């Protein structure tokens, strides 16, 4: 199979695998024949919580890079962090990260307790993945032109975080799941 060239997440390879005329011995089946879709769906809650947690981690990494840069870089005789606009942007970033982190913990605690959490997992993934892109974008802005350069980590994090709104169900799928749960 051909390895795909991707926008981000380049540390993990992606390729299409096709099995033709493949026979799987009964002893090697996961579940029963014909139940693959159900088994895959049963793991979506955990996967969505995992992607939400990944999004929080990437956002936090971008935030910490921006906070460090804003403390070191000087503009008009003082560190960037002392400019009100930058301080406000950092405050918003930190607040959004904390909200997403709490959502992840809530969904994970429900799952750990064996409670239904499809809605909460989808909410956490939706909010965290979209938040992470906003935070990474803000981190690039704080870095200025350096944020757009591959030598600085925020450029890579921004590319990597984009897929979090796609895998384990796109943001629109999460909205669909949440909407259905609200009216059920």
Image (tube, helix red, strand yellow):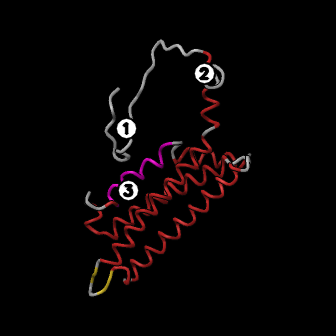
- Distance of label 2 from label 1 (alpha carbons): 25 Å
Q: Which residue matches tag 3?
A: 157
Q: Which mark is residue 13?
A: 1
Is 24 situated above or below 90?
above
Marks 3 and 1 in Cβ contact (< 8 Å) = no
Residue closer to the observer: 181 or 17: 17
Q: Earlier in the sequence, mark 2 or mark 1?
A: 1
Question: How far apart are the alpha carbons under marks 3 and 2?
Answer: 38 Å
* Residue 67 found in image quarter: bottom left
Asked if the magenta segment contains residue 163, the reply would be yes
Which residue position holds label 2? 29
Q: Which residues are magenta?
A: 154-167
Residue 88 drawn at (x, y percent): 45, 77
Q: Could you tell whether 181 is left or right of 98 in the image?
A: right
Q: Position of residue 169 (x, y in %)?
A: 53, 42
Q: Nearer the viewer, mark 3 or mark 1?
A: 1
Q: Is residue 180 magenta?
A: no
Query: What residue is at 65 percent from the left and 25 percent from the top?
Result: 31
Q: Position of residue 137 (x, y in %)?
A: 38, 62
Seen at 48% across and 72% down, the residue is 92
């Amino acid at each position: 199979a051909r390895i795909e060239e991707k926008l981000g997440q380049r540390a993990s390879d992606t390729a299409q695998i096709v099995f033709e005329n493949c026979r799987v011995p009964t002893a090697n089946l996961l579940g029963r024949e014909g139940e693959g879709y159900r088994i895959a769906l049963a793991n979506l809650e955990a996967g969505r919580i995992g992607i939400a947690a990944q999004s929080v981690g990437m956002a936090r990494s971008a935030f910490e890079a921006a906070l460090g840069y804003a403390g070191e870089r000087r503009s008009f005789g003082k560190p960037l962090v002392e400019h009100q606009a930058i301080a406000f942007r950092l405050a918003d970033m930190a607040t959004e990260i904390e909200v997403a982190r709490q959502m992840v913990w809530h969904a994970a605690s429900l799952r750990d307790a064996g409670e239904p959490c499809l809605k909460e997992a989808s909410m956490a993934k939706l909010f965290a993945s979209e938040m992470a892109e906003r935070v990474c974008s803000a981190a690039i802005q704080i870095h200025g032109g350096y944020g757009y350069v591959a030598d600085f980590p925020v450029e890579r994090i921004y590319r990597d975080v984009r897929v979090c709104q796609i895998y384990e169900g796109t943001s629109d799928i999460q909205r669909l799941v949440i909407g259905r749960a609200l009216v059920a």
